[in-house]
Amino acid sequence: MLQAVIIDDEVSNIENLTILINKYCTEVTVAGTATNVEQGLLVIREMNPSLLFLDIQMPGKGGFDLLKSIANPDFEVIFVTAYDQYAIQAIKFSAIDYLLKPVNVNELVNAVDRAIMSAEKKMKNKRLENLIRSISNKNQLRIAIPGNRETLFINPQTILFCKSDNNYTIFHLQNKKKHTSSKPIFEYEQLLKEHGFIRCHQSYLVNSIFVKSWIRVDGDRLLIDGGHEIPVSRNRKEKVKQAIGIQ
């Protein structure tokens, strides 16, 4: 049984989430709650939870402030929040679960199941450390790449391109290394488009800063640093041209 703590500035949100957890997440028990960061830190120290449900936006100090106050966190976190574009972007980059208010039961159950699997590994939460680093310094933003054995953290600007392999994604890096993610490429298209990445083909996502030229012989292709030639599909051709600034 996982001990959980809920931190949210609205008591009604705590009560509603507790009801849902008790009804649908039988492997989790709510051991403590708090309505602000100061109370939350005390409850965490007292209860030593395996799982934290944490609101991001609270009066005064928020959820990220709380996390910055904890050295070497060894618990799982599920954020429960209203929409916040930058915060959710950072959370997604770190491969951490979040729930939008009002909480959807299926999304809650799935997030809790993933938290239970991670908690069973009894490891320091490096995904959480990566999130805290990213929030503290946007220049240190790194994307989490979950694989079968481990999760790697990579600076997006070291990625040359991504290639789809069924429901997996293969990352090709500047240092000529490759890493395979257990997530499909469409998830990274949404995640990386604000960082200069272009979906030029159903199977490829390229980092525009590494595009050297457009090859028009024997089909349209982008020449990428390292000599990689990446196909451009006909239905994406105009959008790719617009993205890299050619006529």
Image (cartoon, grey):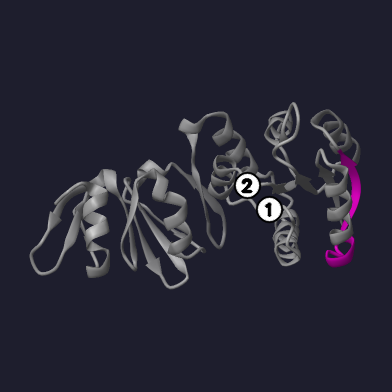
Residue carrying label 1: 100
Q: Residues within 10 Å of mark 2 (few under 14, many from 20)?
A: few
So how many labels did they put on this image?
2
Q: Residue 177, image x and y in percent?
A: 36, 52
In percent of width and height, residue 126 lies at 62, 43
Q: Which residue is labeled 2 in the image?
A: 83
Secondary structure beneath label 2: loop
Query: Vertically, is 177 above or below 195?
Result: below
**Horizontal relation, residue 157 to residue 181: left or right:** left
Say above or below: 169 vs 88.
below
What amino acid does circle 1 point to? Answer: Leu
Would you say the residues marked 1 and 2 are in contact, meaning their CB atoms lie under 8 Å apart?
yes
- Residue drawn at x 35%, y 50% is 197
128 up-or-down from 172: above or below: above
Indicate the quadrant where residue 17 lies.
bottom right
Q: Nearer the viewer, residue 211 or 172?
A: 211
Q: Does the magenta stretch include residue 24?
A: yes
Q: Residue at x 22, y 69 (%)?
A: 234
For badge 2, the amino acid type reads Tyr
| Residue 1 seen anywhere in this rendered image of the structure | no
**Image coords of residue 164 (percent x, y):** 39, 66
Q: Nearer the viewer, residue 145 or 221?
A: 221
Q: Residue 153 carries which label?
A: none
Q: Which of marks 1 and 2 is nearer the N terminus?
A: 2
**Spot occupied by residue 156 in the image (x, y as percentages of width and height):** 41, 44
- Disc 1 crowd rating (10 Å Cα; few below 14, some 14-19, many 20+) is some
120 or 159: nearer the eye?
A: 159
**Residue at the image point whose x is 56% and y is 50% from the top:** 92
- Snapshot quadrant of residue 8: top right
Q: Is residue 159 magenta?
A: no
Image: magenta residue range: 22-34
Q: Is mark 1 on a helix, strand or loop?
A: strand
